Image: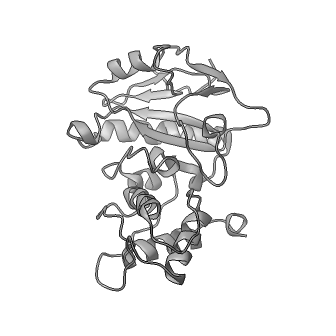
Amino acid sequence: MKGTSLRHRIVTSPNVDPRAAGKTVRILLLHYTDMESAEKACAWLCDPASKVSCHYLVDVDGRITQMVDEDMRAWHAGQSLWKGERDINSASIGIEIQNPGHDHGYPDFPQAQMAAVAALGCDIVARHAIPPEHVLAHSDVAPRRKRDPGEKFDWKELHEQGLGHWVPPHRLGGGQFLQQGDSGDAVEALQAMLALYGYGIEITGDYDRETQIVVTAFQRHFRPARIDGIADRSTIETLRRLIDALPAADVA
């Protein structure tokens, strides 16, 4: 099975098919399992009835299980969108990280697990030439459905280990803000920036429920100190910093 030398074992999932014609790996997508143990998650990801799978599963102790060949299309992203790409499964490698999730206590991610995710992720992006800004959360590509891996996941640490796109979030504080019910040029500009970064959002000039959901997803990943769906100065300035840090080709 084609994959990383860092894996501890292989457990093959039947829930797999070929990548769509012409699609290559350009996204690394991170999830949490939303289950009480990695073994239960592994069993579910191998059950044909589940119709879900992933390339890798990382347990709390850092053990890495490979489940799908990297050349194949795992079924982990579901209905999703990033920079116009709707078949995220054909364009990505998916890592499931053992954590019971928001509905079951949402514990911290242990250091051994974070170290394993960082090492595995760095290995994958190096071999597939995945750019830092394409290392994403499930909640980034499916903000209406997903919250994982969530605000407790340490994206800053991953960036320090060489994985992912990150800038220091702008400090919390006062200043003008945008929220649901607002409309006008400022809202349109916010939506345009979110779309430029990659989020699937319609540019309408109206701060509707969909905009609130996307802002919430952005905050979970890039400004986790406050998750409220309100585009305050901290949120907007953090987004601007991220766009400024993108390669020129991504903002042309």
Residue located farthest toward the left when viewing the structure as drawn? 105
- Quarter of the figure with residue 234: bottom left
Q: Is residue 132 above or below residue 233?
A: above
In the drawing, does residue 47 fall left or right of residue 244? left
Q: Residue at x 28, y 80 (%)?
A: 173
Q: What is the image's colouring? A: one colour
Image location (x, y in percent) of residue 47? 45, 14
Residue lying farthest to the bottom in this orientation: 175
Place residue 182 in its image quadrant. Answer: bottom left
Residue 163 shows in the view: no
The C terminus lies in which quarter of the figure? bottom right
Quadrant of the rendering where the N terminus is positioned: top right
Q: Nearer the viewer, residue 198 or 61?
A: 198
Q: Tell me the residue at 45%/77% (across/down).
A: 237
Residue 155 visible to an observer of this rendering:
yes
Q: Nearer the viewer, residue 47 or 93?
A: 47
Q: Position of residue 8 (x, y in %)?
A: 45, 20
x and y, in percent, of residue 150 in the image = 35, 48
Q: Is residue 104 above or below residue 162?
A: above
74 left or right of 212 in image? right
Residue beneath the point at 55% across and 14% down: 14
Q: Quadrant of residue 181?
A: bottom left
Question: Closer to the camera, 198 or 180?
Answer: 180
Number of numbered discs visible in the structure rendering = 0
1 above or below 240?
Answer: above
Measured as percent of width and height from the top left, residue 196 is found at: 62, 66
Residue at 58% in and 63% down: 202
